[in-house]
């Protein structure tokens, strides 16, 4: 399975997309994410595990409390996803240009 596959699988879940949106605003603790998502800490932990395994998020500790973990987004998987989407967009742009040329040739032939 490719990194892109792992990213798409992780983002297929609406709760995990909500976590990504929350982390776009600022790094947060698991407890803050669970509270903002109105879910239990164990349920949030399962979602965070998937996001960590897909490398979409990373965790770090804080100096004053070894139990506290802060989660933040990682840029690399999103950059790879964005590059893939740009390739798809370029494909459709080329297809639409080809269709436009075809339609315009057909119109010019009918005017005679």
Image (spheres, rainbow, N blue to C red):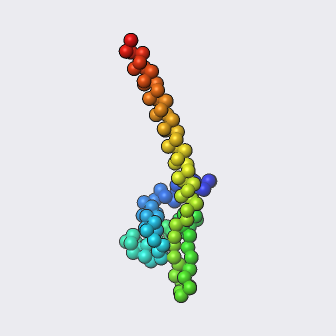
Position of 14 with respect to 48 (left or right) is: left
100 lies above or below 86: above
Front position in the image: 46 or 72:
72
Is residue 8 among the parts visible in the rendering? yes
Frontmost residue, 52 versus 111: 111
Can see residue 50?
A: no
Compared to residue 107, the image places residue 55 above or below, namely below
Residue occupying the far right of the picture: 1
52 with respect to 14 (left or right): right
| Quarter of the C terminus within the rendering | top left
Between residue 57 and residue 44, name the one nearer to us.
57
Residue 50 image point, x, y percent: 54, 65
Say if 78 sits above or below 106 in the image: below
Q: Quadrant of residue 3?
A: bottom right
Q: Point out residue 11 in the picture as x, y percentages from the top left corner.
A: 49, 58
Horizontal and vertical percent position of residue 53: 58, 65
Depicted 112 relative to depicted 10: above or below: above
Q: Nearer the viewer, residue 45 or 68?
A: 68
**Residue 34, position as x, y percentages in the image:** 42, 73
- Farthest top residue in view: 112
Which residue is depicted at the point 46% across and 68% down?
A: 23
Q: For the image shown, how many numbered marks are present on the structure?
A: 0
**Which residue corresponds to the image point at 37% horizontal and 15% vertical from the top-left?**
111
Residue at 51% from the left image edge and 70% from the top image edge = 72
The answer to which image quadrant residue 36 occupies is: bottom left
């Amino acid at each position: 399975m490719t990194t892109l596959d792992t990213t798409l699988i992780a983002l297929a879940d609406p709760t995990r997309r909500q976590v990504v949106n929350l982390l776009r605003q600022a790094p947060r603790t698991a407890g803050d994410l669970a509270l903002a998502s109105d879910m239990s800490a164990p349920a949030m932990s399962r979602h965070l595990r998937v996001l960590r395994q897909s490398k979409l998020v990373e965790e770090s500790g804080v100096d004053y409390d070894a139990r506290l973990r802060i989660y933040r987004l990682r840029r690399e998987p999103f950059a790879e996803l964005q590059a893939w989407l740009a390739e798809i967009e370029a494909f459709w742009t080329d297809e639409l240009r080809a269709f436009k040329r075809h339609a315009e040739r057909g119109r010019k032939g009918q005017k005679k």
